[in-house]
Image: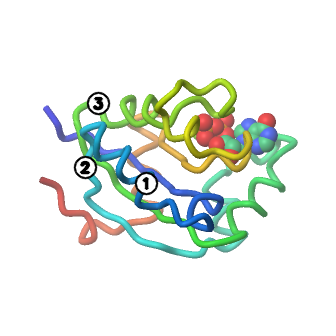
Amino acid sequence: MSKELTLSIIKPDATSRNITGQVNSIIEKSGLKIIAQKRIKLSKETAGKFYEVHRERPFFQDLVSFMVSGPVIVQVLQGENAVALYRKVMGATNPQEAEVGTIRKEFALSIEANSVHGSDSIENAKKEISFFFSETEILED
Ligand code: IDP
Ligand code: MG
């Protein structure tokens, strides 16, 4: 049934260009529902913790600096197969490889400044949602 949840982040390259609404429009047209959303400024510590799995990757420091360079919108999306569906709606990590109509193809500036984050598994979605939201902030349909 349509109870799966995933975590989305609209990244600083998108908030700085004032295209939050355009990103949300693609999300909503895909059938996903934004059931929680807030605009926050990440600290280096929080961004580093969130991207912990990438700590040893060469791009880690740059990624953290980018993620704290401006506000982000953290969101909970609900829908049938929300995790896999949102990965499809986002498009490939590298926008040059992303399919037409995906958020990253439409808006991403580079492989790093690629406009959105989406959880990559149901297990990680649960962890990532609770990283940013308390239960009382999430109103499921
Ligand atoms: P994903 O966001 O598509 O799941 P991940 O491999 O989990 O991609 O990487 C997390 C984020 O790190 C990417 O969205 C992107 O912002 C950044 N990133 C990934 N690969 C590179 C790279 O090769 N160079 C610079 N930044 C990268
Ligand atoms: Mg990832």
Quadrant of the frame with the N terminus? top left
User: Left or right of 138: which side holds 69?
Assistant: right
Q: Nearer the viewer, residue 75 or 97?
A: 97
Q: Is residue 132 above or below residue 3?
A: below
Label 3 to label 1: alpha-carbon separation: 22 Å
Q: Amino acid at mark 2?
A: Lys
Secondary structure type for disc 2: strand
Q: Are marks 3 and 1 in contact (CB under 8 Å)?
A: no
Q: Position of residue 86 (x, y in %)?
A: 40, 37
Q: Is residue 42 left or right of residue 54?
A: left
Disc 1 marks a residue whose amino acid type is: Gln
Q: Is residue 27 above or below residue 86?
A: below
Identify the residue at image location x=12%, y=53%: 141
- Can you see residue 104? yes
Image check: 16 left or right of 25? Answer: right
Q: What's the residue at 62%, 71% (across, down)?
A: 42
* Mark 2 crowdedness (10 Å alpha carbons): few <14, some 14-19, many ≥20: some
Sequence-wise first label, 1 or 2: 1
Which residue is under mark 1?
22
Report which residue position mark 3 lands on.
Answer: 81
- Compared with residue 81, is residue 12 higher up or lower down, i.e. above or below? below
Are there few (<14), some (14-19), or many (20+) residues within 10 Å of tag 3? Answer: some
Query: Gap in Å between the C-alphas at discs 1 and 2?
Result: 14 Å
Q: Quadrant of residue 38?
A: bottom left
The percent coordinates of residue 51 (x first, y second) are 66, 51
According to the image, label 2 marks what residue? 33
